[in-house]
Image (tube, rainbow, N blue to C red):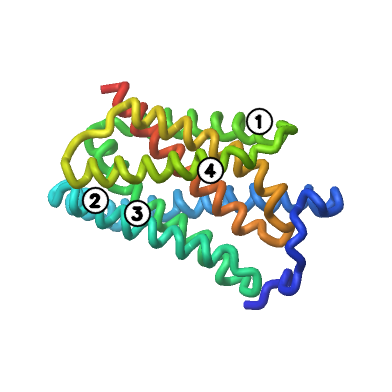
Amino acid sequence: MTSPYAGATMIPAISAPAEDREAFVVRVYQHVGLALAAFVAFEVMLFATGIADALTDFVFRNGGGTWLLILGGFMVGQWLASNAAHRLENTGLQYAGLFGSALLQALIFAPFLGILIGTGASSDIWIAGAITAVSFVALTIVGMTTKKDLSFMRPMMMWGGIVAIGLIVAAAIFGFQLGVWFSAAMIALMGATIIYQTQAIIRQYPVWAHVGAALALFSSLMTLFWYVLRLVSALRR
């Protein structure tokens, strides 16, 4: 499907007329909401069909090496989804990237949610969801209202992400646990990332790139939820 924005310029939204800029921001958050709805729908489908239970058994029966392979596949899939969501010339491919990312998130969350539900700790999911939602709104407000250019944060966030991936890989290989302090650090990193991305979608994305911008925010939001859920479940045990 050809995009109606094909041939559009790369002028960032901040330089577009106010009406176009506001419409762009609305579309971005509408699409974040669509991705969240798709994530919930995929998760319900995985549990209803028994796929989630099978994934949970498979991951925890085979140990860290299997989880490392799944994490690697997830990262590759997210890269492909992000690339697809930024394909200006093909609207269908953009949406495939966004909803493909929602499916990948549902698959990676399924074993964790399965353990919580199986051990009677499903309330942790709702508590973490509420904390994540309130945090996302607060971080969005900060990102939208701050006047300071936050581009200086990008190298620090990239370095923090590389360190985090290294620690996750090491934990999977050598079998040690990443405790509550790691979860707290990742929550702080994702909070900073969301603030930066909230500003970046205005300063860096053109008005036609609302699907790609939504995917960037959705990915950070789901990572924030993951570590909030880890922290809540650890502190309530």
Quickly name the residue at label 2.
Answer: 67
Q: Which circle marks residue 107 in the picture? A: 3
Residue drawn at x 27%, y 43% is 114
Structural distance between the alpha carbons of marks 3 and 4:
30 Å
N-term mark: 2 or 1 = 2
> The residue under label 2 is which amino acid type?
Trp
Q: How far apart are marks 1 and 3 (CA)?
A: 31 Å
Asked if residue 71 lies left or right of residue 226, the reply is left
* Residue at the image position 61 percent from the left and 29 percent from the top: 138
The label shown at residue 155 is: 4
Of residues 159 and 197, the one nearer the viewer is 159
Quarter the C terminus occupies: top left
Which marked residue is nearer to the observer: mark 2 or mark 4?
A: 4
Query: For the residue labelled by badge 1, is the local secondary structure a helix, a strand or a loop?
Result: helix
User: x, y (%) of residue 15?
Assistant: 81, 52
Say what amino acid the circle numbered 1 marks.
Val
Q: Nearer the viewer, mark 1 or mark 4?
A: 4
Direction from residue 180 to residue 212 in the image, left or right: right
N-term-proximal mark, 2 vs 4: 2
Near-viewer residue (135 or 156): 156
Query: How many residues crowd mark 1 within 10 Å: few (<14), some (14–19), many (20+)?
Result: some
Query: Is the C-beta separation of discs 3 and 4 under 8 Å?
Result: no
Amino acid type of the residue tagged 3 in the rendering: Leu
Q: Note whether 120 is above or below 158 in the view shown.
A: above
